Amino acid sequence: MTDKRARNEIIKENSHQLRGTLAEGLDNVITGDIAEDDHQLIKFHGSYIQDDRDVRGERAKKKLEKAFSFMLRLRIPGGLVTPKQWLALDAIASNYANGTLRLTTRETFQYHGVIKSNLRRTMQAINAAALDTIAACGDVNRNVMTAANPYLSKAHRQAYELGKAISEHLLPKTGAYHEIWLDGEKVEDKSRKAGAAEEPLYGIHYLPRKFKTVIAVPPDNDVDIFAHCLGFIAIVEKGEVTGWNVTVGGGMGMTHGDTNTFPRTADHLGYCKLEQAVDVAEKVLTVQRDWGNRESRPRARLKYTVEDRGIDAFRNEVEKRLGYKLGKPKPYTFTGTGDPLGWRQSLDAKKGEDKAWNLTLFVENGRIKDRPGHSLRTALREIAEAGLCDFVCTSNQNVILANVAQKFKAKIEAALKAHGIHISVSSGLRGNSMACVSLPTCGLALAESERFLPELITALEDSLDKAGLRDDDIVIRMTGCPNGCARPYLAEIGLVGRNPGLYNLYLGAAFDGTRLSKLYAQDVGKERIIALLEPIFVKYAKERKPGEHFGDFTIRAGYVAATKAGNQFHADVKLA
Ligand code: HEM
Ligand code: SF4
């Protein structure tokens, strides 16, 4: 019988629990590359091999190998780092990477441009800061996101603690990470028969695809819970979490032209008690491990398992493995997916309490760097050096300066001002924008994203001014390909790269993250995007009902049909 399994399944099986030939590859100084199968395995260690696509053509002409370097992503459950860790991460950006830190759309940092000869040193520097990159990528449970800012309330702290507990519990147990990156000890004897004993939860094949877990505290849906495989929604009574609604089966990625693939919003699985959540997470993960599609990677995410088997069958299997039934989901309300920018006092701060302030700072597309007149990286380094606050990465690519004492507020404001950083943003649209990295590093990019969205927003701000909407919160997200790393299908305006300079334009997603968008125009460039959106802005400003969000309006006004479920994403499309 032919083996129908996806190639990655065989690579994992033969990898001796993610070791492959990574250690040997790192020692090979002839090339900046590593072995092809190791391209897949290194993801489980938190890294992607990439090359600078801006210079690809030129290097090919000169018959040089691609300008290889590595992207390195950290695992930071809940996105919280201390000032000391911030300083260590900042130093690594200069010592080993391209001088920037990138806040990702999943509450962590990425480095770009780490060359192979520096990889081990970078990993060791990250480890010295009591952080790691284990399982930041690959077919495992990835970085666990929790409602931004554990200092905001007791419920937020409980969500954060759960995030850390799930992250630890679902971490791969292989010794490969320590052997390859940290100890420098001889890698395991390759003749040893790969066994499941080293990975009691994952076995030798790990999961069929990546697995993403998030925890939300209503009314904020800042973690975009419905975009993720597994979610916990805090049910809060008298300021404390008493249990969690559980969601499963969300995900963004799809393939252009393949309607068998689609973004999907998660379903409610049920309700569990406070202390049952880690167990529930484990059982959901094992059902996906055993039921997920291992033949077709584009159909291997948990969202397709739930779609194909049905939520009831999925729930029955989870309950069977738990040995108890889940309760019915409890009522809750979400109001939005964004980060409230600016200063915010901790919600349960006692009168006169000192350390109760938090500043959410907009970071355009998450890129922390210095540019003339806007030295964000230096400002944040100075704030960390002075130990004025902790730092929390948000899932909207922003940073929260958290747990600030009243007396330090002015110091923080002065440090930001001295480096040209404003607390306010130029428009509601920009404040609610996200872009994935895309070019020049991402090998999958079809069009610009991070380097293009800021200028597109500047142009759209003129259109907003014409409609009088500059300060309105409208969510816009862009990605360079349909994989959807910046969750564009849950944005009120979503732009997804198809070809250089050309995007698919999606409208109609819900502001609170509960409804996907719908394709509105195909292969549109900058001028056409503006020409399409401007009249809609004007009409929205004139005709909206009180409190009506832009996404809801584009449906009511007939621009797009509502997408009620993932499997309806490609239905009822009428192009502009
Ligand atoms: C399903 C197919 C996907 C593939 C193959 C994929 C692959 C990649 C690659 C290669 C990068 C590195 C880009 C760079 O740093 O140069 C990246 C970045 C990233 N991806 Fe994905 N991705 C997928 C979907 C997603 C989705 C759905 C999410 C979130 C829900 C996500 C979250 C991220 C994050 C947080 C980053 C870091 C950079 C950023 O903030 O944009 N990815 N992805
Ligand atoms: S959405 Fe596509 S282009 Fe953007 S980072 Fe993800 S994989 Fe790369």
Image: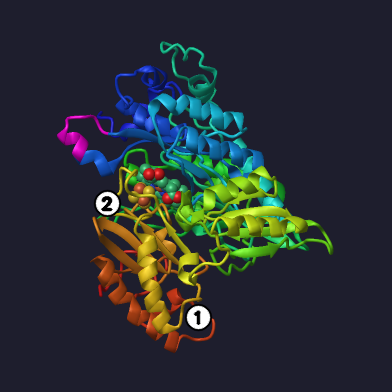
Q: Quick one: 297 or 224, which is closer to the camera?
A: 224
SS of the residue at dot 1? loop
In this view, 181 is above or below 358: above
Mark 1 — residue? 548
Mark 2 — residue? 446
Residue 290 visible here: yes
Left or right? Give the position of 61 relative to 94: left
Residue 324 visible here: no
Residue 118 percent across, percent down from the top left: 44, 27
Name which residue type carries label 1: Glu
The residue located at (62%, 54%) in the rendering is 415
User: Disc 2, disc 1: CB below 8 Å?
Assistant: no
Locate the C terminus and report the quarter of the image it occupies.
bottom left
Crowdedness near tag 2: few (<14), some (14–19) or many (≥20) residues, C-alpha within 10 Å: many
The residue located at (26%, 54%) in the rendering is 258
Name which residue type carries label 2: Leu
Q: In front: mark 2 or mark 1?
A: 2
Crowdedness near tag 1: few (<14), some (14–19) or many (≥20) residues, C-alpha within 10 Å: few
Query: Mark 2 vs mark 1: which is more N-terminal?
Result: 2
Q: Quadrant of residue 535?
A: bottom left
Q: How is the image coloured?
A: rainbow
Q: Is residue 59 magenta?
A: yes
SS of the residue at dot 2? loop
The magenta segment is: 58-66
In this view, 471 is above or below 185: below
Residue 493 percent across, percent down from the top left: 39, 68
| Mark 2 sits near ligand 2, with its Cβ under 8 Å away | yes
